[in-house]
Image: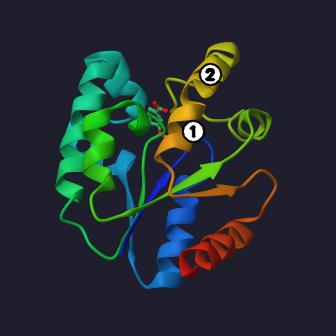
Amino acid sequence: MKIILIGFMGSGKSAVAKTLAKKLSAQAIDMDELVLKLSKRKSISEIFEKDGEISFRELEIKIAKKLTKTKNAVIATGGGVVMNKIIIDYLRSNSKIIYLKTSFHAISQRLSQSTDRPLFKDLKKAEELYNQRLPFYNYHADITIITNNKSLEKVTDKILKELKR
Ligand code: S3P
């Protein structure tokens, strides 16, 4: 089984991937971590600053391609993968896509201390991005889970329930 977690920055994809993977005895994979490793930069922000967003997306394409062969894994994606057809098509192969849907209000509270999110520096711009991406998350989701005030445990249990349906 391969599970792909999609959703906006701060929707809890990485944390949910770890918890869910444990429960499923699967591997937890974080795309941002793999992209960072491949870039040889120190942070995601540094990739954006020194190489530009397009280079970041190219690295994401490479990682998504590699992940097509992965099995028995829960993959936390970067918030932008739904905007790139090449990336989402690679991710979609043999997988279930789960959208962690979180309100912008909840996200802005969670991310107020975040430092390594180049696309979440300006609140107004981030909200525009959120609204622009919402239909794409909805479109690509096989399963949608509302995460707003739910604990990690609750979100994970809800996903497990939905997967059994
Ligand atoms: C991005 C989201 C980030 C990271 C990069 C770009 C985006 O991942 O991939 O900063 O375009 O939404 P998270 O969703 O894990 O924060």
The residue pinned by badge 2 equals 126
Q: Nearer the viewer, residue 25 or 81?
A: 81
Tag 1: residue type?
Met
Image location (x, y in percent) of residue 114: 62, 35
Q: CA distance from mark 2 to mark 1?
A: 9 Å
Q: Where the N terminus falls, by quadrant?
A: bottom left
Give the mark, 2 or 1, whose residue is nearer the N terminus. 1
In the rendered image, residue 48, in percent from the top left (x then y), is placed at 36, 22
Amino acid beneath label 2: Ala
Relative horizontal placement of residue 46, taking residue 69 as reference (left or right): right
SS for callout 2? helix
Mark 1 Cβ and ligand 1 under 8 Å apart: yes
Quadrant of the image occupied by residue 50: top left
Q: Would residue 62 be visible to someone looking at this image?
A: yes
What crowding class fits label 1: few (fewer than 14 Cα within 10 Å), some (14-19), or many (20 or more)?
Answer: many
Kindly identify which residue carries mark 1: 9
Foreground: 129 or 41? 129
Question: Do residues under tags 2 and 1 come within 8 Å of each other at their CB atoms?
Answer: yes
